[in-house]
Every structure is written in C-alpha cells, then in structure tokens.
Image (cartoon, helix red, strand yellow):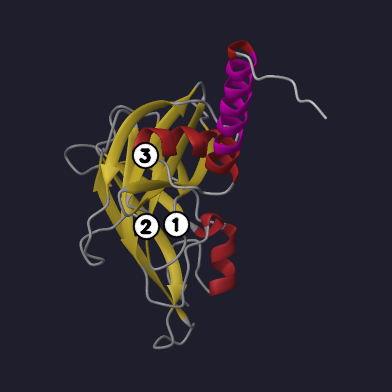
Amino acid sequence: MSTRPVTPARRRRRILRDTLLLAAVLAVLVLRMDFPVFTARQALAATQARYFFGPGEVIAALDNPQEWDAGRFGPSDRYYILRWGDWYAWCGISRSGPFWRTGSLGAVENDPSLPLIPLVVDEYSYGSVLVVCNDPGIARVELVFPVSSPETDSGCTLLSASGGQTAEGCFLIPYYIPSGSFLSSDALQVKGYDAAGALRYESPVPERWAGYGISVSGEVG
C-alpha cells in the first residue's frame, strides 16, 4: 500500500496545526488548572480571566512580607489592587519555584454615596481588608470587629486595626485575629479619620453584633 509523500506544504500545515493545538492546551492549563506561568503579569491576567473581571487597571502591587508577624495581607505572595470602571478588586497570586500560580480575586462595586466601602481580602488569622474611599479628607481608616474570646463573659471581644492610604482612594489594612476566629464582612464596622485625627465617618454598628452581645454603643455586655 503506497503512502502519500509528505510535501513541504503539508509539513508546514501539520506544524501549524500542532502549534495551535499546543497553544490552546496551554491556555486551558493556565486559566483553569493553576498551571505555573512565567511572570506575575501572566498570573494576574489569568486570574482576572478566570473570575471574569476586567482586565482592570493596576493601581497598586504589594509584595507580602515573608514573616507572618510582619503585617502580612494574607496567604498570597503578591497582592494587586485593581480598578475596572466602577468596580474595585484585590487579586492575590503566589510563587511556585521560579514560576507563578494563578490565585484568588474579590471585587466590590463602588458606591460614591458611601465614604468607605470595605471588602474582606482574607477571613482568617493574618488577613486584610480593602477599603475603597470616596472622601478625599479621610487620611486613616480603622476597622472594628468582634472575635471569639473565651476569657470574656460574653464569649467575644472587640478588636481593631487601622492604616493609612495604600493607593489612590484605597486602603489595604492588615489585621490579626486569634487562631480559630474569622472576620466576617457583615460584622465589620469602618471608621474614617482626617489628618488631624478627627472622626469624619463611622459606619452603622452591624446588626450582627447583637448576636455577640454587643450593644449599639459598642459595649460588650
């Protein structure tokens, strides 16, 4: 049985077909399977694509401290603050040897009528909260939140964390809570202060605080 000769034209078509197939397979691996990618920018783009966000404008890129007690933002090695129209997002990616891995992303839609809009980046132990600020007079943001505390009669206590502006109109505030506790977005109160330390805005006390035995005034009962 004779076989058709492989001409240069057929060889080129086969090479082109195989190249396109390989590119498609690699794209699927990068976008869907956390396959290591070569650069942080590629990992950022792949993460945004997976979460159907953007591509957003990078307004800050922050490398996480290696020491867990040095104000880490969360478990990822690098965090980005992104803006896409009226939406803001954080995106965390991590290293994998000489490569990068795609990571996680959370987003919130800006509401210009609110001075401060919080978005929890990581809920456990060492984490952070991204706060979008619509009041240019706010220079420092404080987070107030309840956590479990067996030492108190109510079984909880109020903790706080604060920080200055990280990037244009955004505050990324790290916090630490005891192991076994977690920070819930619907139990978070935010406050904004001007450069002199005067209170400019205070969000309402969350309704969920009542379940912790905390009054509207913030007193633990």
The label on residue 38 is 3
Q: Residue at x 36, y 28 (%)?
A: 58
Asked whether 126 or 1 is in front, the reply is 1
Say if the magenta span includes residue 14: yes
Q: Is residue 158 left or right of residue 6?
A: left
Residue corresponding to mark 2: 74
Q: Residue at x 32, y 41 (%)?
A: 171
Asked whether 188 or 8 is in front, the reply is 8
Counting the numbered discs, the total is 3
Q: Which circle's residue, 1 or 3, is located before the other in the chain?
A: 3
Q: Position of residue 71 (x, y in %)?
A: 24, 58
The label on residue 34 is none
Which structural element holds mark 3? loop
- Residue 115 visible in the picture: no
Q: Nearer the viewer, mark 3 or mark 2?
A: 3
Region of the chain picked out in magenta, as a range: 10-26
Look at the image and tell me in which quarter the N terminus lies. Answer: top right
Task: Identify the amino acid type marked 1.
Answer: Asp
Query: Residue 200 appears in which quarter of the rendering?
Result: top left
The extreme right residue here reads: 1
Which structural element holds mark 1? loop
Q: Is residue 143 left or right of residue 11?
A: left
Q: Mark 1–mark 2 contact, CB under 8 Å?
A: yes
